[in-house]
Amino acid sequence: MEEDIRRVGVMGGTFDPIHNGHLVAASEVADRFGLDEVVFVPTGQPWQKADEVVTSAEDRYLMTVIATASNPGFHVSRVDVDRSGPTYTVDTLRDIRSEFGRKAQLFFITGADALEKILSWKDAEQMFELAHFIGVTRPGFELSAAHLPEDAVSLVQVPAMAISSTDCRRRVAAGKPIWYLVPDGVVQYIAKRRLYQRP
Ligand code: ATP
Ligand code: MG
């Protein structure tokens, strides 16, 4: 008899801050692929952003919890926040896989910009064994899987949200609004913790 396999989406990101582009992508992929849940995984130290100032992992983790709390199908994992050293997606997937055991199939969700560079990620071949990859459209980037192994990746069109965390940070620093770009609770958390103010 075939076992019940849980279909689990994994959405990795710096989430500095999490915004509605991340949330729409996860929601749309969950619907299209019949996922049972999506686990958001804020990075510890993002290795691609080693030269940039990144907000503390705890603040990014909490904003991710606030943003996803109302959706029963969304969860947040601390695996990357709690692992020391730079965050590599292959380790994220190994940890999530051992958490769920064999009864889960993993789907790693990534935007078109990240998908472009994926072959430069650590142990890329093993990543493709651990999860099926789902590349989603993102305004300003071309979505293509031509450079990736066949069958490893699916491409999905999601509602276009021209939002980036970089733009949200700049807006806060310039005193401009971020309402409706990020969930209300995240706007309030950023104000409360005075994140992204000019130094
Ligand atoms: P930053 O500007 O700091 O790089 P970001 O907006 O790109 O932030 P990340 O945390 O770097 O957000 O991205 C996490 C994941 O979400 C990546 O796979 C990225 O491609 C995807 N993503 C981010 N924004 C969007 C968006 N507006 N539409 C679709 N995918 C997105
Ligand atoms: Mg990014």
Image: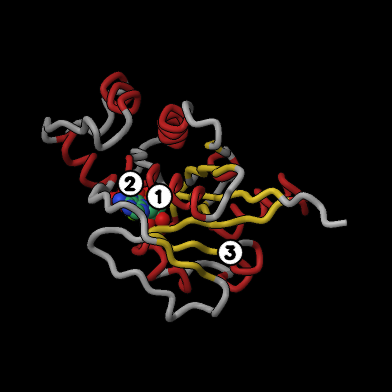
Mark 1 touches mark 2? (CB < 8 Å) = yes
Check whether the beta carbons of the residues at disc 1 and disc 3 lie within 8 A of each other: no
Q: CA distance from mark 1 to mark 3?
A: 16 Å
Res 21 label: 2
Does the beta carbon of the residue at mark 3 sit less than 8 Å from ligand 1?
A: no
Amino acid at the residue labelled 1: Ala
Secondary structure under the numbered disc 3 in the rendered image: strand
Does the residue tagged 1 have its C-beta within 8 Å of any atom of ligand 1?
yes
Residue 155, image quadrant: bottom left
In the figure, residue 107 lies in which quadrant?
bottom right
What residue sits right under mark 1 in the picture?
Answer: 25
- Compared with 50, 120 (above or below) is below
Given contact means CB atoms under 8 Å apart, are the residues at marks 3 and 2 in contact? no
Q: Which residue is mark 3?
A: 132
Q: Residues within 10 Å of mark 1 (few under 14, many from 20)?
A: many
Locate the N terminus by quadrant.
bottom right
- 6 or 119: which is nearer to us? 6
Q: Earlier in the sequence, mark 1 or mark 3?
A: 1
